[in-house]
Amino acid sequence: KNEVEQSPQNLTAQEGEFITINCSYSVGISALHWLQQHPGGGIVSLFMLSSGKKKHGRLIATINIQEKHSSLHITASHPRDSAVYICAVGTGGGADGLTFGKGTHLIIQP
Amino acid sequence: GAVVSQHPSWVICKSGTSVKIECRSLDFQATTMFWYRQFPKQSLMLMATSNEGSKATYEQGVEKDKFLINHASLTLSTLTVTSAHPEDSSFYICSARGQRYNSPLHFGNGTRLTVT
């Protein structure tokens, strides 16, 4: 079973700061997901990665398959970015369930 | 964009009763849907994989007779918590993806179940 480790567990930063959240996993994967969970519980899929780098607005996700490591970056952070960010990996085909990290609780202070 | 609708968003029920949670893909067909459970301050845990037209695949430790899953169509999967117990109080969330291998994953907004 894949072990997914995220760091840091908690992060508080000032508005405008550059944020990095890290994710490491133990077994080779088919895809890695970065998810955002707001206080109400709803989850939004931010990225699905199998290699390289993806960018969407102020969010950037990278993955290094050899090192089994991924990072999520937030540029020019804003209080509305405050949420729990979750890394999840899938090891099978398109119908595989995911293994989740415990999440990083991010607070951006104005 | 594609949306997964989950209903209800919260429910309170008495011990011993059953609760049904619905997960619908609104504008795409989902051959496979997934059900997860999240206890406070813990990560999501996969409970089962719901396959349209066939039996669900349950993760180890998840009682299939307690958590009944029905995936009767390509747009609807239901999770029924039978004979609910306070220990079943949790946040339940579903996800679905389209039929292509690299289709994006979409999550419902979750259901907060409280069993009294």
Image (cartoon, coloured by chain):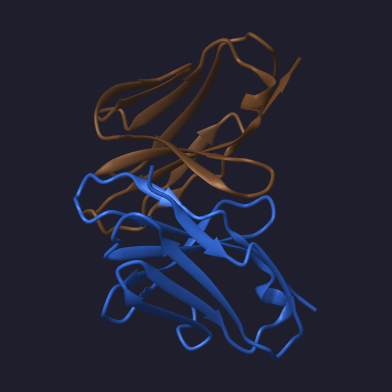
* Chain the render paints brown: A
- Residue B71 in view of the camera: yes
Count every numbered label the image shows and give the total. 0
Res B89 → quadrant: bottom right
Q: Residue at x 32, y 33 (%)?
A: A68
* Letter of the blue chain: B
Residue A34: percent from left, percent from top: 44, 36
Q: Residue at x 30, y 28 (%)?
A: A67
Q: Quadrant of residue B71?
A: bottom left
Along the line of sight, the residue nearer the viewer: B111 or A66: B111
Residue A88, above or below A66: below
Q: Taking A2 as reference, is B116 above or below it?
A: below
Residue occupying image coordinates x 60% and y 15%: A77
Q: Nearer the viewer, residue B102 or A70?
A: B102
Name the side, left or right, on which B41 lies relative to B102: right
For the N terminus of chain B, the image quarter is top left
Pick the quarter of the image with the C terminus of chain B. Answer: bottom right
Q: Residue at image x 74%, y 86%? A: B15
Q: Position of residue B101 (x, y in %)?
A: 19, 50
Figure check: B72 above or below A42: below
Residue B27 location in percent, x, y?
35, 54
Q: Nearer the viewer, residue B72 or A94?
A: B72
Q: Position of residue A9 (x, y in %)?
A: 62, 34
Location of residue A31 by image quarter = top left
Question: Does residue B60 appear in this view?
Answer: no
Q: Is residue A104 left or right of residue B22?
A: right
